[in-house]
Amino acid sequence: MMRGGSWFLKFTGLTGLALVWAGLAGSAPSTAIRFNHQFHLGEDVELECSACHAAGESQASGDRLLPTMEVCGECHDVEDDEGCAMCHADMDNLEAIDVPPREIVFSHQAHLGYEGTTCQTCHAGMEKVAASGGTHAPEMATCMTCHDNTAGPSACDACHTDLAHLKPASHAGEWAREHGRRVRTGDAACATCHTQAACQECHEGAKLSVSLPSLGSRGAFAPQSQGDAGLVLKGAHELNYRFTHALDAKGKARRCAGCHDRATFCIACHNPDADADAFRPAWHNGADWGAIAGAVGSGGGRHARLARRDMERCAACHDIQGDDPTCTLCHMDRLPGRGNDPKTHGGRFKSQVGNGDFHDTPNSICFNCHTLKGPAGGAGFCGYCHGAK
Amino acid sequence: MSAEVRATPDLRISAEFVHREPDLSLNSILSVFEVSSNQEVGGRVYYRLNPQAGISASAARVIYDGDSTWRVGLGVTLGNAYVGYSRRIGYGGQNDAFSAMAQHALTPRLTLKADGSISGYRVYEDQAARDRALAASLGATYRPQRKLSFSLEGQVLRNAYYARDFRLFFRASMWFFKRGQ
């Protein structure tokens, strides 16, 4: 057993340091200039984008493409001290506008060289923008209309250089738990960044564990989007999940069967036939468990209560495709119709089953317990409905 | 069934109701037994303090036939770091757990990532003492150029079964790509 106190202090201390270390914030660009794109691009002036922005020669996303005052001076009288306020909204701050650093790999020159690509292809709607300020960079969805792995590559690092900070704001908090609901409601543009392979990294049932599910940010170990796999032992669950997964299973925090085939996956460890002493849980013991308290008519004892409440928990060990006889040791139809066998089916079972598959299927699961004839050769299972034959 | 309200631009509130029927294969002998469903009622609040930071709180109660379990959680996101606490009580087991994760680009070519979790838990009703589990990992990825990366990660875990389990992973990745005409 671990000595938890010292580890706890170390852990919380390291956590605090990590938060301080990672808490870096960006700065917003200054917007101290009044400029009306709508007017300048409109029919009164009819300027081309290139009249102000020298994007045609730009090869790096960080290039400064804002026009200098000399460019403005080709039309405006920038020497007129009385007219400064027409453009400079803040006369107390005449510093050059900050251009934030760009982490994107982007060449305006290369993109404008592609056939059919104009400024408006990415910066659509500029002719309607009346106010200056902010950024007019296109949304990533615009990029993806061409970067679909045919016209252009869709791998993250085809454009992004800082893969560690690609996680969008929506992925904050317990996104790993929450994303399923958003996917179901269509409120998630997963395909913008992820391929189906990314889903399968966790949802294929072959992974063992991950250190933390909360952020879902594995960019550091994802040299390209199609290769979104983490390191070995990274996937959907934390490292200790093998030992703590019962909490999620019992508490219904996750749906194990969504990814794992219970009949083959759970049984790899939960095999009651392998070593009954080693794998029989301690809580299966006691006089109230079932062997004694579960006598016919008693209600079945504790095992029946727990089974009704959470049969999936039983299935983790006892659902091995008919190989496990545990249930049928008692739940048999030995004396049909006499009520001497433990109760198995619920009150609505007959209506739920309907005609069932036992009429047509010799391998019907009903025949695990029921026999066609009674012990004396008379009416058995068939006789329940069809009488003695 | 779920609903979400964005009360303010920074405050998101969601509620959820889940009705679960037992998830059993039709060809399983267990499917013929009398079973009961369970219901879950839960809520979650996420408040964005600023573009870099937010806090979240969640609570859920699962109601079984004759018992119930609670799950509550608190989390703080700061930049690319997260720290959270979760607590569980009731039929689903008892658990108090802290978890944290941080990822940071030390330089444009070197990214560090660290995470960890510690929990004290009791799965079974008659379990005398809580088990403790600790897991942590520390990794770095170095990308000398865009198409080439080297990753190194160490993982350690301690729990009721392993006094210590340490693993060290290394991966090199080269991306071969050439744009067609």
Image (tube, grey):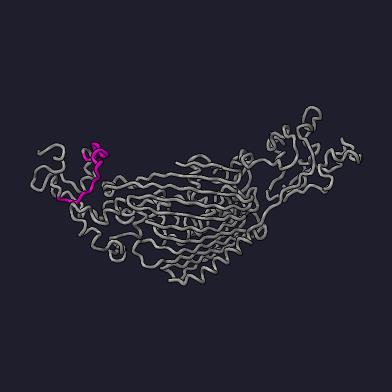
Q: Identify whether A271 is placed above or below A141.
A: below
How many labels were placed on the picture?
A: 0
In the image, is A24 to the left or to the right of A312? right
* Percent of width and height locating residue B174: 59, 55
Which residue is rendered at x = 41% and y = 68% of the image? B161
Q: Can you give x and y, in whole percent of width and height, for residue B118 in the image?
A: 49, 64
Q: Is residue A346 magenta?
A: yes
**In-image side of B173 versus A1 (left or right):** right
The quadrant where residue B78 appears: bottom right
* Residue drawn at point x = 68 percent, y = 38 percent: A122
- A255 or B97: nearer the viewer: B97
Q: Would you say A372 lies left or right of A108 here?
A: left
| B126 up-or-down from A224: above or below | below
Residue B181 visible? The answer is no
Decide which of A26, B128 is in the foreground and name it. B128
**Residue A260 belongs to the span the image colors magenta:** no
Which quadrant, please, contains the N terminus of chain A?
bottom left
Q: Which segment did they paint magenta?
A: A340-358
Residue occupying image coordinates x 20% and y 52% = A331
* Dominant secondary-structure state across the stretch colored magenta: loop
Q: Is residue A241 visible?
A: yes
Residue B143 position in % (x across, y down): 63, 58
Q: Is residue A367 left or right of residue A311?
A: left
Q: Quadrant of the C terminus of chain A?
A: top left
Residue A234 placement (x, y as % from top left) = 50, 58
Residue farthest top in this picture: A43
In which quarter of the view is residue A114 placed?
top right
Taking depth in this image into account, of B23 and A48 the one nearest to the observer is: B23
**What residue appears at the point 43 percent right and 44 percent down from the top-left corner?**
B17
* The quadrant where residue A286 appears: bottom left
B148 or B81: which is nearer to us? B81
